[in-house]
Amino acid sequence: MLHQEHSAKRHEPDHIIPIKHGGKDLDGNLAWACFHCNRYKGSEVGAFDSETGQLIPLFNPRRDIWEEHFSIDAGWIVPHTAVARVTILVLQLNRPDRIQVRELLAQAGLYP
């Protein structure tokens, strides 16, 4: 994840549960998302986990605790749970360009 001040495009509101899946326009269902993550997520609410084969919900920033699911190692977002694995997959959090940006920001003392 990246702070808006370090992003090339402005962050935008995202429906955690999309309207088409019954989500509401309420604060508890909205999260601030980077442009790219929001485009990759689209109306997804989960994905099939590569390790278990089960349908797993995406990380919910209003309910889940980041440190219980993820850690960061040299710019790489490391999954610790099935929720993390599917979130990384769907949002494409470990694309090479994203890792490089996080590494550069970390070297400048700006990340995480």
Image (cartoon, rainbow, N blue to C red):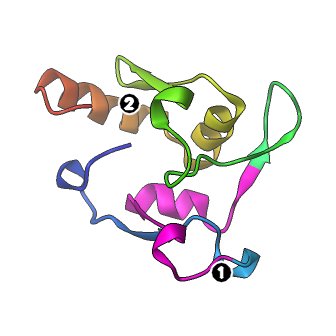
User: Residue reaching furthest right?
Assistant: 53
Q: Are marks 1 and 2 in contact (CB under 8 Å)?
A: no
**Splitting the image into 4 quarters, where does residue 105 fall?**
top left
Q: Quadrant of the N terminus?
A: top left
Up the image or down, 71 lies above or below 60; here it is above
Q: Within 10 angstroms of label 2, few (less than 14), some, or many (20 or more) residues?
A: some
Q: Which residue is disc 2 drawn over?
A: 99
Residue shown at the point (10%, 27%) measured from the top left: 108
Residue shown at the point (20%, 48%) measured from the top left: 6
* Amino acid tagged 1: Ile
Q: Is residue 3 magenta?
A: no
**Splitting the image into 4 quarters, where does residue 44 fall?**
bottom right
Left or right for 89, reference 93: right
* Amino acid tagged 2: Ile
Up the image or down, 28 lies above or below 97; here it is below
Q: Residue 81: x and y, percent? A: 66, 27
| Label 1, label 2: how far apart the Cα atoms are | 31 Å
Q: Which residue is disc 1 drawn over?
A: 19
Q: Is residue 28 magenta?
A: yes
Left or right for 55, reference 41: right
Residue shown at the point (63%, 40%) measured from the top left: 89
Segment colored magenta? 23-46
